[in-house]
Amino acid sequence: MGEGEGVGSAEAGEQAMTRFDDIYDRPDPRAFFRALGAFEYQTPHHAQRIFRRMLAMRTGSGGRDGRVASAPVTVLDICCSYGINAALLNHDVTLAELYDRYGSAPIAALDTAELIEADRAFFAARRRPDAVRVVGLDVAANAVSYARAVGLLDEGFAENLESAPPSPALLAAARSTRLITVTGGASFLSPRSFRPFLADAPEPAWVAAFVLRTGSYQAIADGLSAHGLVTEKAAPHTFPQRRFTSEREQRYAVEAVTAAAEDPRGKESAGYFHTALHLSRPPQDATAFPLAGLLSPAQD
């Protein structure tokens, strides 16, 4: 599972979609940024502002009951890859700046150990005062290890909850989770990957997922409803994910989106995969914090 998601994310699309499998579990993220940057992969950029607003709603500006959280707030990033969401959430840096950094000649000249040291200093100098604790989960052990070594993840776990239950260490690390995020790989997931973090949680977590429009989120939404969470889709607003690599990819996407009763005009028909934001919360939170407020263009 990785950030890009457009790697053959569902069986129907596996043969039509370009696979980027070889970039998801390298010792460092340079190949990831080179490969996906060429196709303008941008979902974490869209998520950066929205995730920060969600956390403001959940914490400093009051939780569900209007009180500031007393325990450290935890974000659980599922399919965390190299910790890109954590980098953007907790540091004064943009996705465009990361593309520039990892594509630069000085960074290309470093070995992985040297890059880890350089990245540790780079992100430490840009750490935001409102940074929160981030736990990462991904099947890619090397990517998780890099994100931990650099300091992007407070804790990271290379586990596949689709095939095995979570380790006790993962459950303990994620116990105070108040926001679960997914920006890539949703189509690899089922309710099994979410259930352990919602059952017996001290407070219901919000689940925010950017999901390719070529697939369906319904099975996950149905699973979350069993834990008292209602799922809203931020329609008709969508977010460009990346450019297509071929006409074949585009034909597949247009056909899949149309089959899902969505309109590809000006979106997939214009050359990009698009995602839709799905946000699952307790009903009272959905009432108190309207979804439309998360999508306003004002800067944070």
Image (cartoon, helix red, strand yellow):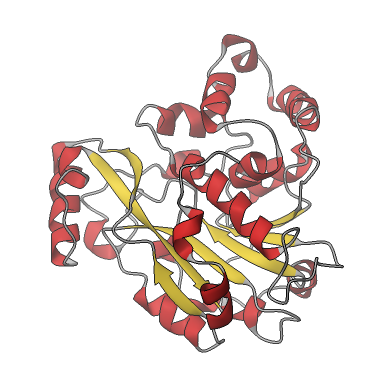
Q: Give the farthest residue toward the right.
A: 70
Left or right: residue 225 versus residue 10 is right
- Is residue 163 at least partly visible in the picture? no
Picture quadrant of residue 120: top right
For the C terminus, give its image quadrant: top right
Left or right: residue 222 versus residue 266 is right
279 versus 90 height, above or below: below
Q: Give the farthest residue toward the bottom.
A: 226
The front one of 259 and 296 is 296
10 versus 99 height, above or below: below
130 versus 188 height, above or below: above
- Percent position of residue 154, x then y: 79, 51
Question: Residue at 42% of width from left, 83% of height from top?
Answer: 222
Question: Residue at 58% of width from left, 10% of height from top?
Answer: 105
Left or right: residue 242 versus residue 102 is left
- Percent position of residue 68, x then y: 80, 66
The front one of 125 and 68 is 68
Left or right: residue 202 versus residue 15 is right
- Percent position of residue 112, x then y: 69, 27
